[in-house]
Image (cartoon, rainbow, N blue to C red):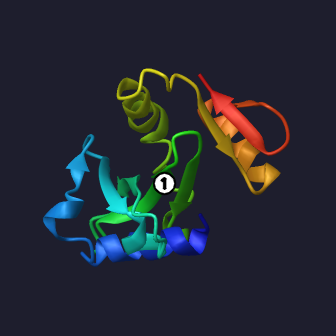
Amino acid sequence: MTDKMLNQILTNINQLVYKNEDYAIRSIDSNIDIVNINDKDCIDQNSYEFYDFILIKNNDMTSTLKYVGIILDMVTDLHFYLLPNFRGKGYLQASLNTSILPFLSFHDEDRKVQRLSFKESQIKEYFMNQFGFKSIGGYEAEKI
C-alpha cells in the first residue's frame, strides 16, 4: 500500500468518512485506536476483505486532527504512515514497543515475530536503532 493511499485513508478517518457502525473504532490505549475497514471502501478493491488499521492519536492540543498516523496491519508486514508535520515528534516511540507490538502479539499467538519491509535503507536503520529490529537481509527486518 502506498503512502498516498494511507494518507487518503487517514484523511477519510479524520473527516469521519467511515463513521457508520460497520467501522467502529476501538481504543487500544490512550495513544492508539484500531479500526477494521473493508478494502472496497478504502482502496477500491473488489475482494471485500477487511483490514485492521492502527491509528496513532494526536497529542497536539492546538491541532484539530484526531489521528496523525496510520498503520495497515497486513499480518506478515506493517505499513506505516505519519503525516509529514508530525514526523520526528516521538509518536512511534510512544507507541510501537509499548502498545502496538504487544497488542498484535497478544491477540495472535502465532505472531511473536513481527517483520517489516522498507523502501529505503535509511528507514530500516531508523527502526533497527530506535525500536530494536534486527536485519534479516535486504530491506527487511524483524523483531521478536
- Who is closer to the viewer here, 136 or 57? 136
Give me the residue at 28% from left, 78% from top: 15
Q: Give left or right: position of 67 versus 5.
A: left
Q: Residue furthest left?
A: 21
| Residue bearing mark 1 | 72
Residue 87, percent from left and from top: 55, 61
- Who is closer to the viewer here, 98 or 20? 20
Give me the residue at 75% from left, 57% from top: 119
Whether residue 73 is situated above or below residue 11 in the rendered picture: above
Residue 139, percent from left and from top: 79, 45
**Residue type marked 1:** Leu
Whether residue 96 is situated above or below residue 2 in the rendered picture: above
Q: Quick one: label 1, few (<14), some, or many (20+) residues within 10 Å?
A: many
Residue 80, percent from left and from top: 55, 55
Whether residue 11 is situated above or below residue 30 in the rendered picture: below
The number of discs equals 1
Asked which secondary structure carries label 1, the reply is strand
Would residue 75 be visible to someone looking at this image?
yes
